[in-house]
Amino acid sequence: MHIDQIDTPAVLIDLDKVEANLARAQSYADANGLPLRPHVKTHKLPQMALRQLALGAIGITCQKIGEAEAMADGGLKDIFLPYNIMGADKLDRLAALHKRVTLSVTADSAETIAGYAARFAKAAPLKVLVECDTGSGRCGVQTADEAVKLAQQITDAPGLIFGGLMTYPPKGEIAKADAWLKEAKAALDLAGLPPPIISSGGTPDLQRAAEGSVTTEYRPGTYIYSDRMQVAWGHGTLDDCALTVKATVVSRPTPDRAVLDTGSKALAADPVPAPLRGHGHIVEYPDALVHSLSEEHAVVDLSACDTRPDIGDTLRVIPNHACVVSNLYDRVYLIRGDQVEREAEVTSRGKLR
Amino acid sequence: MHIDQIDTPAVLIDLDKVEANLARAQSYADANGLPLRPHVKTHKLPQMALRQLALGAIGITCQKIGEAEAMADGGLKDIFLPYNIMGADKLDRLAALHKRVTLSVTADSAETIAGYAARFAKAAPLKVLVECDTGSGRCGVQTADEAVKLAQQITDAPGLIFGGLMTYPPKGEIAKADAWLKEAKAALDLAGLPPPIISSGGTPDLQRAAEGSVTTEYRPGTYIYSDRMQVAWGHGTLDDCALTVKATVVSRPTPDRAVLDTGSKALAADPVPAPLRGHGHIVEYPDALVHSLSEEHAVVDLSACDTRPDIGDTLRVIPNHACVVSNLYDRVYLIRGDQVEREAEVTSRGKLR
């Protein structure tokens, strides 16, 4: 099928761009001896995860158990959940998943570890990494001492294994995160609890990831598709963006205004960092500004455009944030050039738990 | 089931608040002789639409055909699509839907009307309203003359019936929209094309809707659940908000910081208008600020809170924008007080086309 035959809105994934993005990252990883464990949040598709493994990734990363269950159903065998998992329902599901795949998780508190410790037994122990806040201000222990304390608690639990350290580092501050992790590693070594894994991540710093001197594996997510946000942060160019949203011009109320059928339900409302502006880049009209979204409408300012689209024309929009777009669609189209290779169900979409 | 037994993240819909919100709006509509045709985008649930009808609504509004198809499956019989519908796939689906329910649509261009005219026949004509841009700067004709021209084109097409005028008016500017519509109505009357319906909408101005002197029906959406955005715009209070997202505190990295398991995948990233701030209102900790979201984490600033939650505690968050939250969940919980009355599948979720 030609992509012209696809009704809108629709997500199109350019497989040649995907391959180029994956190859570039894996080459860097191989050249620097830094294994990749890609985060599937961007694509939410088992076949993409399997392709990442085929190229050399050592396993995958999922944020929620539901995503991991869908990936296990799709044939994935080694899954890291860098999340504090708690509550009886989730721990039951974690235990069931642990029987199906090689699983590791994280914790940043004694409470989370106590939950794991009560649920897992020595016969089939669970690997737990300690999450460290190296500057991004989200989850994670605040000091090396806390990391040692939690590592000891994990080690003391018969059903748990201390897996090492995990961080979601602050963007552009590899040295800062590395200093934090080096100090924690030294403290753990001194305590007789050397961390087997030190896991870092993030696409914006992927091509500099090996500057993290103690990092043993890296979890990039968005690199597979890229998006305007990554480009704004200096990762690649718009030409690398593999995910586009096909849209139709449904209205041309004034000479300077077009309205597309891709509102926030189709493009997501995430803002883009400066210097970029607006809610997407229109490939065919690069000077157009997608200046506002409501749920079902994107209002486009054409005042800077020499040529302008007509009512009924279709366009392709590079979104600000590819990952959240994947979460809005039940199915996506995998394309090569202008041909649809196949449709794929986004099996890890909407997995909130 | 008690709501304490619901795992997180989860959407909880308080049916008593829903009833109060619907009754308040319907009372106003009845007292002012202004029929309601609620927009289902907020709830995306047929049973809620049926309840709106039972209380007096004259039909429903959907934005996309897919939403309307799901509503027709759920027993709804009178559906207005205030959208320019174009392309062979969508016109085929529109024709099929037209056989099942009483349908009306809009157009703001000759091209859109030509599409309808080619697809519908005199034996079963399609009612088409002309969309007017009365100041919100989205779709719609710009002048009364254009409205007359399109009304004539509709009237001249054997398979179409001129239904009247539709607008999505600028917030807080009822008089401005009314002046526009009055002028258009006068021009249409003069042309021998009196508009049978003049449809306006929007929850923020719902309680003043009858100030629109020529409005014959009104399409409120968010009023059924309300949200922080509506409260910021002056519609009701936080206590009216019927949709909350149940969340778990998964991390307490510092005394002033909590992290919830409800990121942008669970709360959506839509900003809230000033004077409100942040990405949600935590019912149990009203002084907490949900200051940033990533996909799976909400970072909360507790510095203004006297009491603070512990790891594992659950909370309820009123989101900025209820409609986009409904679109993120396959199922929601309908509750009365602290008891779950039933789970409901969000059948119009993710209907992008």
Image: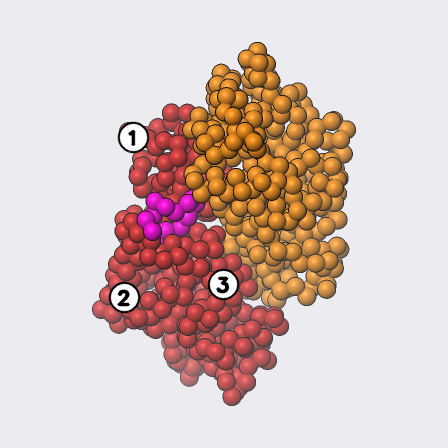
Chain colours: A red, B orange
Residue A222 occupies quadrant: bottom left
Query: Of the numbered discs in the image, which one, if any, rests on residue A307?
Result: 1
Residue denoted by label 2: A26
Residue B40 occupies quadrant: top right
Q: Are marks 1 and 3 on the same chain?
A: yes
Query: Of the numbered discs in the image, which one, if any, rests on residue A139?
Result: 3
Residue B114, given in percent of the width and then of the height, sits at: 44, 28
* Circle 1/circle 2 CB separation < 8 Å: no
* Within-10-Å neighbours for mark 1: few <14, some 14–19, many 20+: few
Out of B223 and A35, give the one closest to the viewer.
B223
Q: Are marks 2 and 3 on the same chain?
A: yes
* Within-10-Å neighbours for mark 2: few <14, some 14–19, many 20+: some
Gap in angstroms between the C-alphas marked 2 and 3: 28 Å
What amino acid is labelled 3 in the image? Cys
Gap in angstroms between the C-alphas marked 1 and 3: 48 Å
As helix, strand or loop, the secondary structure at mark 3 comes to loop
Residue B35, given in percent of the width and then of the height, sits at: 70, 31
* Circle 1/circle 3 CB separation < 8 Å: no
**Camera sees residue A332:** yes
Disc with the residue nearer the chain's start (1 vs 2) = 2
* B150, above or below A89, in the image: above
User: Looking at the image, which residue is at 39% across and 47% down?
Assistant: A6
Range of the magenta residues? A1-13
